[in-house]
């Protein structure tokens, strides 16, 4: 009985939720990386396809990484400028591009697999089973 209580206390602060299905991943990407009018369309199909095995938190990280790419480009331009530009001549932050998405996917790996064995063991030890 003690082992079960220890396992429960260890797991109770974690929510064991399944990974998002393709439709849920697409909705998350569309919410976190909305279409920008007048700009090249973002590759949502690619994002959904290549994010199999990603948790919601992983998807949020991919979106943050993609959103940082235009800022990194801007900082590079500003840092390479030999003179200080007046405020009215400062370059603008550009849009998120498909290349930014590619970089974000390469730099952000799924983390859910790191804990999968713990969830499977807990379910094997304490989960409900259908008897038939």
Image (cartoon, rainbow, N blue to C red):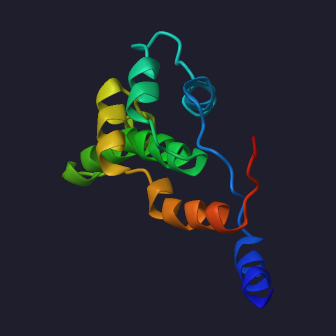
Q: Is residue 117 above or below residue 24?
A: below
Q: Is residue 74 above or below residue 127?
A: above
Q: For this rendering, which residue is in front, 43 or 97?
A: 43
Furthest residue toward top: 38
Q: Residue shown at 72%/59% (left/top)?
A: 127
Q: Residue shown at 68%/50% (left/top)?
A: 17
Q: Is residue 50 left or right of residue 58?
A: left
Q: Is residue 105 above or below residue 31?
A: below
Q: Is residue 41 above or below residue 122?
A: above
Q: For this rendering, which residue is in front, 52 or 128?
A: 128
| Quadrant housing the C terminus | top right
Which quadrant of the structure image shows residue 118? bottom right
Q: Is residue 12 left or right of residue 32?
A: right
Q: For this rendering, which residue is in front, 75 or 14?
A: 14
State the image coordinates of residue 7 (x, y, percent, origin top left): 71, 79
Q: Is residue 74 left or right of residue 57?
A: left
State the image coordinates of residue 83 (x, y, percent, origin top left): 24, 51
Which quadrant of the structure image shows residue 79? bottom left
């Amino acid at each position: 009985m003690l082992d079960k209580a220890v396992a429960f206390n260890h797991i109770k602060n974690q929510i064991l939720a399944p990974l998002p299905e393709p439709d849920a991943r697409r909705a998350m990407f569309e919410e976190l990386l909305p279409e920008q009018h007048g700009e090249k369309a973002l590759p949502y199909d690619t994002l959904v396809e290549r994010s199999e095995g990603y948790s919601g938190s992983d998807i949020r990280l991919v979106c943050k990484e993609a959103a940082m790419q235009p800022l990194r480009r801007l900082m590079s331009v500003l840092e390479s400028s030999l003179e200080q530009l007046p405020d009215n001549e400062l370059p603008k932050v550009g849009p998120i591009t498909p290349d930014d998405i590619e970089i974000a996917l390469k730099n952000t790996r799924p983390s859910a697999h790191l804990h999968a064995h713990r969830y499977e063991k807990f379910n094997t030890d304490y989960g409900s089973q259908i008897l038939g």
